[in-house]
Image (cartoon, rainbow, N blue to C red):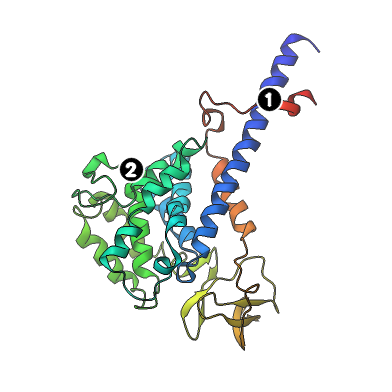
Amino acid sequence: MNILQRLFRFDHDLTTYKVQFARELMTSLLSMAWFVEARDPYTGGHLWRVSRYSRLLAEVAGLDETETARVSLGGFLHDLGKVGVPDAILRKTAPLTDEEYEVIKTHPDLGLRMLANHPLASLVKDAVGLHHERPDGKGYPLGLTNLDIPLDARIVGICDAFDAMTSHRPYRQGMHLNKALDNLERGAWQQFDAILVKQFVALGLAGELNHIMGHSDDNIPLDTCPMCGPTLVIQRTHQEGQHIFCRNCTGGFTLVKKEGQLRADPLGIKGSAADLEPSLDTDLILRLLESTIQHLPINDLFGDAQPTPGILLND
């Protein structure tokens, strides 16, 4: 093997290693974010929905494939810092007090601290740390205004707010589409970027959000617990006859095929502690990973802190 062939192989193997390294790092982040969400039974599918809304809005805002992939990834990871919010607050079944809201407001900063020195932090730090900033300067944690708020954060902030408004909570029903869109329009210039709101509302009026609202995955709507509302997340890998449990009231259900889709039928039993342990939706994570990573500039992700190829280059 001559020197040119050896250099070519080294470059090829290094690129392959970096792609695999980035894939493993990203998988760990996505899995961590998914488990953060799984602590709150009323937000099933929230990260997936915000990621999908963010991708749509980034596309109509004119972002290229790389930028759109980055925004979509930020949408999935935006609530990473909620790992530090106590369950008593995160799962509270009534509106938060002012003191509890102050605790919630710490999650963007905590998310940034969790990402500190992470090789992929530059991809999602704006979405994680700044998605609650507002054009009028009344957001948190920094009180940024207008275009000082990065575009990724402005996009994810709108999508996060829309999903919060349209999702069911124990103390209120989720809003209908048109009411939530009206609320976004009323918040333009103050709470939300006005141009992005106009583009998002257009998506909603055109029916482009309907396949995401009330779903936890493509073509998989949330199912309804008779006691708690639409809290039941059915995963693509679930099978007919399998049991699932509401992680709020612990009620048990069996999955049956109805009109070509799996639906949950009550069993009249309560789940044990083992039944209520969240099960990572590996299939969803891997699909999101593969649809995202193919558009990201892997060779530029690590800066000067390159991973050491080790044994791979000696094969």
Instruction: Say above or below: 175 vs 298.
Output: below
Left or right of 174: which side holds 285? right
Q: In the picture, residue 97 is in which quadrant?
A: bottom left
Question: Residue placed at 21% from the left, 48% from the top?
Answer: 135
Answer yes or no: do the residues labelled 2 and 1 have beta carbons within 8 Å? no
Instruction: Say above or below: 314 vs 43.
Output: above
How far across and down, in percent of the image, does residue 91 sit? 43, 70
Q: Secondary structure at mark 1?
A: helix
Instruction: Say above or below: 30 vs 315.
Output: below
Q: Between 247 and 286, which is closer to the camera in this rendering?
A: 247
Q: Secondary structure at mark 2?
A: helix
Q: Which residue is mark 1?
A: 12
Q: Quadrant of the C terminus?
A: top right
10 Å crowding of disc 2: few (<14), some (14-19), many (20+): some
Q: Quadrant of the N terminus?
A: top right
Cα separation, mark 2 vs mark 1, equals: 34 Å
Question: Residue placed at 59% from the left, 57% from the top?
Answer: 284
Q: Is residue 206 visible?
A: no
In the picture, the disc for residue 151 is: 2
Identity of the residue furthest to the top in this view: 3
Instruction: Say above or below: 309 vs 189.
Output: above
How many marks do you count on the picture? Answer: 2
How far across and down, in percent of the image, does residue 233 sit? 55, 71
Tell me which amino acid carries mark 1: His
How far across and down, in percent of the image, does residue 40 sit? 47, 67
Q: Between 160 and 251, which is closer to the camera in this rendering?
A: 251
10 Å crowding of disc 1: few (<14), some (14-19), many (20+): few
Q: In the picture, residue 214 is in which quadrant?
A: bottom left
Question: Residue placed at 21% from the left, 44% from the top?
Answer: 145
Question: Residue placed at 47% from the left, 58% from the top?
Answer: 47
Tell me which amino acid carries mark 2: Leu
How far across and down, in percent of the image, does residue 58 sit? 39, 47
